Amino acid sequence: MTALPGSLPARPQAGESEPVTPALSTPGLLLKLYRPDLVRALEALDIPPYRYAQVLEHLLRHPDTPFSEATSLPTELRAALADLGHNTLETAAHAVAADGTTKFLCRTRDGHEVECVFMPYGRRATVCVSSQVGCPVGCVFCATGGLGFRRDLSAAEIVDQVRLAAVAAARTGHRLSNVVYMGMGEPLLNLPAVLASIRLLTYPRGVGLSHRALSVSTIGLPAGIRRLARAEPQVNLALSLHAATDELRRRLVPGRYCQPLAAVMAAARDHFALTHRKLLVEYVLLEGINDSPEDARNLARLLKGMVVTVNLLPWNPLPRSLLRDPGGTGRPDSARTAALRFAPSPLATVQTFAEILRRADIEAVMRRSKGAEIRAACGQLAADRGSYRARG
């Protein structure tokens, strides 16, 4: 999730130069936000406005049904839209873990590949979606960071991951209840598309998800955090922290997107002041790196007085083949090579870490990563075809 110095083209800090997308509520405007190609086709046919709503609702409510079978639309309109396709992604492969967690390898129309993960919990299910092809952040413990950055995903490509998961949920008897923007990429560096996807996913006559069922994860971009708060105050913010001192965090997040912790936490406090939503902190525990009692006490001091839940996550090992160089030289850089020496913290260490936080009145939850056996767990997404072999 970050790129190393010198390996990226310059790009603005999220929220500094991009206007906030205005609230969009009519089906025609939402369809244009989602699939402008379809809107152009409808405009060329001089189709009445109510047809825009029908097209949008067909896409969002019937994700596995092509336009040729959209019985709510007249035959001539179905034929006109069929060639444009009802999905911007195709499923290139999938892998299923023993607990039902399913990883999908999705191919975009221009040939890029990204992954999303369907995770069942009882009768409900959550989908973890990607927001970029690769990631410019380059966290040394994350496989996605080894890909570097290719391009942003469009709002349609984000929404269509959810539509894909909705089909999987229906087939397995689950209700798709939550979406987490925690897959490949840094969502706040693609905030216009993320915000557009949120508006589409919460459209009552479509997927109809609650804003509070959506969580956006970030490495900590202050301007983007504040913009998300203003634009979508009911959406959850998840902060990928992983360290409680600037020195340690720069080791784990070595690129230009590692902002000073003081600035990140000030933005998180501003987010709460605007939204009154509990902050979710994601903390990947690495044995001997960030899991000592002193690290826990530093984290407790950093979060003192905040309404927060700390999710303590196990580090999921990365194959050597995924520790690629974001600069494109074909050689892993020294920071990423260090990941070969990482190890997940032992259970006793995690329990001690959690207890120190709880004694400081900070809610701490020890999480179990789903999908590690198919490389679908946190930090493992890298569009690696090897993880799909012999899995179907």
Image (spheres, grey):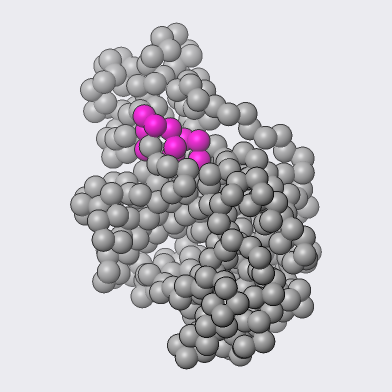
Residue 80 sits above or below residue 276 on the image: above
Q: Residue at x 44, y 17 (%)?
A: 42
From the top left corner, tell me how far across and down residue 92 is, in percent.
37, 54
Give the vertical position of 363 relative to 84 (above or below): below
Q: Is residue 203 magenta?
A: yes
128 in magenta: no
Residue 112 placement, left or right of 137: left
- Where is residue 351? Give x, y as percent: 48, 85
* Magenta segment, prevailing SS (helix, strand or loop): loop
Q: Do we see residue 367 in this rendering? A: yes
Q: Is residue 373 above or below residue 205?
A: below
Write the residue at 77% across / 44% down.
16
Image coordinates for residue 344, horizontal then vertical, percent: 51, 84
Q: Is residue 222 above or below residue 293?
A: above
Q: How far from the left and from the top, in percent, is residue 30?
A: 49, 27
Quarter holding residue 21: top right
